[in-house]
Amino acid sequence: MAVQSQEAKADRQSQQFLQPAARTSWRVGVLAFLHRVGWLKLLLFLLPALVLLTVYLVIPIIMLVVMSFYKSTMFGVIPDFSWRNYQHFASSTLFVGLLGKSVRMAITVTVISLLVSYPFAYFLARVPVRFKTALLILVMVPFWTSYLIRTMAWLPILGIKGVVNYSLLSLQIVSQPIEAFLFNEFSVILTLIHIYMPYMVVPIFLSLDRLDGRLLEAAGDLGANPLRAFWHVTLPLSMPGVIGGVVMVFIAAFGAYVTPKLIGGTSGIMFGNVLADQYSGTFNWPFGAVLALIMISVVLLLLVAASRITRLDAVFGVRA
Amino acid sequence: MTSSRTQWLLRSYGFAVYAFLYTPIAMLVLLSFNDSTAITLPWGGFTLRWYWALAENQSLFVSLKNSVILGLATAMLATTIGCLAAFAFRYRFRGQVVLMRVLLLPLVIPGLTIGVALLLLFHAAGVRPGLLTTTLVAHVGFALPYVFVLISTRLHRFDESLEEAAMDLGADELTTFWQITFPLIRPGIIGSALFAFTLSFDEFIRTLFTIGNDNTLPIQIWSMLGSMVSPELNATATLIVVVSVGLVVLGELFRGTDPVMGAIKKAREERQ
């Protein structure tokens, strides 16, 4: 029944196509014009995205650059172009040190995420096909819940009265609650790993899943043991996924603001926090612009370096 | 022998990682039902009173309403703009690769710097910060590359001969789009609209710098974290988790019912 009615519908539709009189003449004219002037059609398709990109990305970054040369005074910012804000950054051990510390923490997060995620992605790629999609979605689900909430979820776990301490106390493993779980570098790194691990798992999984099993068989036939086959075949072929994951996790961890603010205390503070402080606490917008530009530069440098090693477009799953 | 042991090891490892990923959120949800004034253990028994407290919280309702409105507007705009751009990329044109990279650039620029830069822009332009002005721009810009990628990948798998057939039968481009192309990519479009809604619903950092005096749910949580620490917080967070997880699962289901993917799968099965 349903099939028949669908066929009838298709029939009616094809009849529609064959009746040029049903179309209004202006529509024919406009379409013909657009067809002739191909670039105009393309422009119409791209225009909304280009406008949005200009407002969302291009002009704001130009604003940052301009603002970074302004001068902050008691009465607000004034256009007094000079390098003073950059010099202020370069001569401040506090800010340079914090930049180094954030890079170091982001590297730690990235390396541990990689070590944890690679075998996990390997497990996902080897799972029977019928479970694969479901298990992959299970990885993505926490990723689609706000990082604010996933950060905050660690508070009742790591706190001095938290779940971990509660368990340790009731199991009589410790006699005093341990303060060292929360409000320091450790808790920030742990939470960042927890939040951004899916960024690492998914690209590695994709590159492992694409891997042609016959290559491993061939390696085995040629006398390589599984370990050698892994080292010489699997690992090199999964490199694009690894690099994609490393880039994404590093960028996310380096740009963190919420996590160090919520559970970093004073010792777990990161570059993003002092950046944000220039806009909410001390109101030094020009200096904040310098810090933001430095953050963006670090990210862009990493992207350039990574794109030298592998094609990053492939990592995003887009063929240009 | 050894291979079954490595298999077993690999599986237990996999489940340990899942436990790591899910325990904190599960704990949060569990603690939102805890009959105790502390946000953590000990377990004081099951209660719904934190949810009742939420129901009486007026500002929470306002922020929930704001989040939903903003999410809907973001989903609609981002999907339309992203879809149009994805269609442009079916043609070959000069500067295509560069433009693609620029379109994807927002994926890797830290949200904090975007938020700060947008604050500067709107301040300089004299735009008063608000939910459906400044924050909407921030959210649509944030969601656009995701939507663009989702729809592009869908269009890459699209069988262009279907459109050619329609054109051969005398349909013009608009008719072909509405009768052939759109119905086939509709699940992908609905799926990416749901993702865009979720992205907006969860967005925090760009919102913080662009929203002014309005409130969204994540901003509400942020201010609650500063002032009060009660299980009401856990209940609010659980609410957000349920909404986003529900929407993502729904989105996946839509993507799963994709006729294009279904046809490809069927063809593959027949070949085997």
Image (spheres, coloured by chain):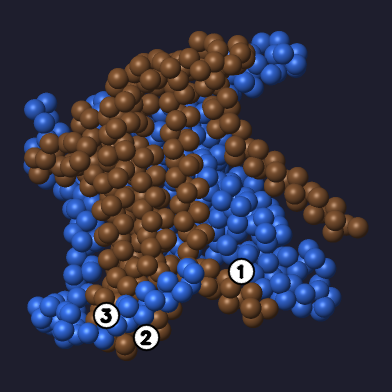
Image x and y of residue A268, in percent: 47, 29
Inspect the image, locate mark 3, and give the three-letter code of the amino acid beneath it: Gln
Question: Is A215 above or below relative to A150?
Answer: below
| 2 vs 1, front mark | 2
| Chain A display color | blue
Report the residue that reaches farthest toward the front.
Answer: A1
Q: Are marks 2 and 1 in contact (CB under 8 Å)?
A: no
Residue most extreme to the bottom? B168
Q: Residue at x 81, y 79 (%)?
A: A222
Residue at the spot of label 2:
B165
Could you tell me which chain the residue with mark 2 belongs to? B
Q: Is residue B26 visible?
A: yes
Residue A210 shows which numbered tag? 1
Residue in view at x 28 percent, y 66 percent: B85
Q: CA distance from mark 3 to mark 1?
A: 44 Å
Left or right relative to B95: residue A4: right
Give the crowd class for mark 2: few <14, some 14-19, many >=20 residues within 10 Å: few
